[in-house]
Image (cartoon, helix red, strand yellow):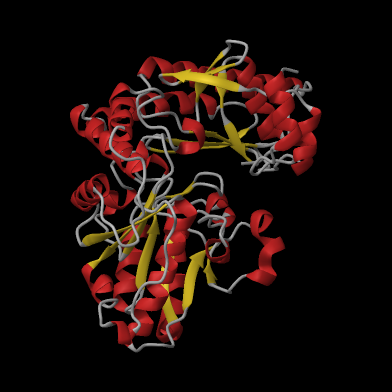
Amino acid sequence: MNEIELKDKRYIWHPFTQMKGWLNNPQTVIAEAQGIKLIDTDGREYYDGVSSLWVNIHGHRRPEIDRAIIEQLGKVAHSTALGLANVPASLLAEELVKITPPGLNKVFFSDDGSTAVEVAIKMAFQYWQHKGKTGKRRFVALDQAYHGDTVGTVSVGGIDLFHRVFKPLLFEPIHIPSPSCYHCRLSDNPGECGMACAGKLEEVLARQHEEVAAVILEPLVQAAAGMLMSPPGYLARIREITKKYDVLLIVDEVATGFGRTGKMFACEHEDVSPDLMALSKGITGGYLPLAATMTTDEIYNEFLGEMKDKKTFYHGHSYTANQLACAAALANLKIFRDDNVIEGLDFKIGAISDKLALISELEHVGDARQRGMIVGIELMADKKAKLPYPWEETMGAKVCMKAREYGLFIRPVGDVVVFMPPLASTVEEINHMLDIIYRSIDEVTTDQVPVCGVSGAHF
């Protein structure tokens, strides 16, 4: 064990990780990176197959983003957004308004995905209070939803494993079935089953719209639930229903934004303009923490008033609109434009689809789901009977550790192997990474051999 790994194990508590397993097994220590590869302290290279938890877009050490941060360091690294404006934040806000769905004309900056959603929840609640509709206090959320780890975002979450222990701290949303729930996936017509879930929302709002402030969902893909995909038309139907009953729509594009689904934002696939949109992860190209909550003039205007009216949105963060992060985000968006990133994704998405067809044929792959550059490969003990592996076998983690032996870093969500490479990956690199996944699944699920280093982590 090298000195850094020793210090890590002595002092650091890792997120979403069973630390007993972490302490008992050897761990990879990353020292540097280049392009789409991570490099450990022994000089071994690994493809970054989950984009460093879905944040990296154009690869590591991208010169344009490096330069933007260095240039900004020569001016100012940070000054507060409470009482002061700054240059890169103002320019970035303008760019975000240009590229997000029509009507999202105001930007509230924060630090990460959880805070972006927390801001949206609080804005939606306070908006209706200012409108005089004080009874509209509840939120509708999907089963199996994940929106972050602050108390507000956990409240609208729906993943029992992550959230049940905190239940005494939470407010109670109205849960409706996910359009990609277990029953939908077993159905002979999963799309029809999924759309029926939209009907459940209409049933709820027909009865309770006077007490509902907003519906919140992850558009097209419920990521932390295991890359569950909603059927075509579902998102647009939800937007129709919320408008019909005068309920706000919050879309959480933290995981799906910035090209992951094949368009800049998932909402674009169905021409949906929400009332509030949460952005983070890929916003800086994977360089620095930053988030944004986009909203409409209608919502913003309800917070305007004299000091005596007490309409101010009393929410903020020490590093709101940080100049370094905003400079990185501006460089990130410029690369999207200069390199025609979105236009170049079709071939890569097609390459993934071709490889997934082969992976789907493996004996212990129950389902291989894809939306653009987002992939979830579900492992099954018995494919025909749709029988999952026992939880304690941590089969997803074992497959990911086997892949690491072959030079690919990926992370599971339970027994779903997640593949979300940087958008900058070439077709050849994508094929190589998916070949490693194929080999790893085949070897681990067929031979059932022990794999060194499994920590029991599931996200």
Q: The N terminus is located in which quarter?
A: top right
Residue 175 occupies quadrant: bottom right
- How many circles with numbers are drawn on the protein? 0
In the image, residue 242 sits, relative to residue 382, either above or below, namely: below
Front residue of 181 and 307: 307
Residue at 44% across / 58% down in the picture? 317
Q: The C terminus is located in which quarter?
A: top right
Left or right, 331 with respect to 178, comes to: left
Would you say residue 363 is visible in this rendering? yes
Left or right, 345 with respect to 252, comes to: left
Location of residue 151 in the rendering, given as x and y in whole percent from the top left corner: 58, 64
In the image, residue 451 sits, relative to residue 90, either above or below, namely: above
Residue at 38% across / 84% down in the picture? 129
In the image, residue 162 sits, relative to residue 57, either above or below, namely: below
Front residue of 241 and 166: 166
Residue 362 occupies quadrant: top right
Location of residue 8 in the rendering, given as x and y in whole percent from the top left corner: 69, 31
Location of residue 29 in the rendering, given as x and y in whole percent from the top left corner: 63, 23
Residue at 22% across / 34% down in the picture? 334
Location of residue 385 in the rendering, given as x and y in whole percent from the top left corner: 68, 42
Left or right, 112 with respect to 292, comes to: right
Front residue of 236 and 404: 404
Would you say residue 261 is visible in this rendering? no
Front residue of 17 and 441: 17
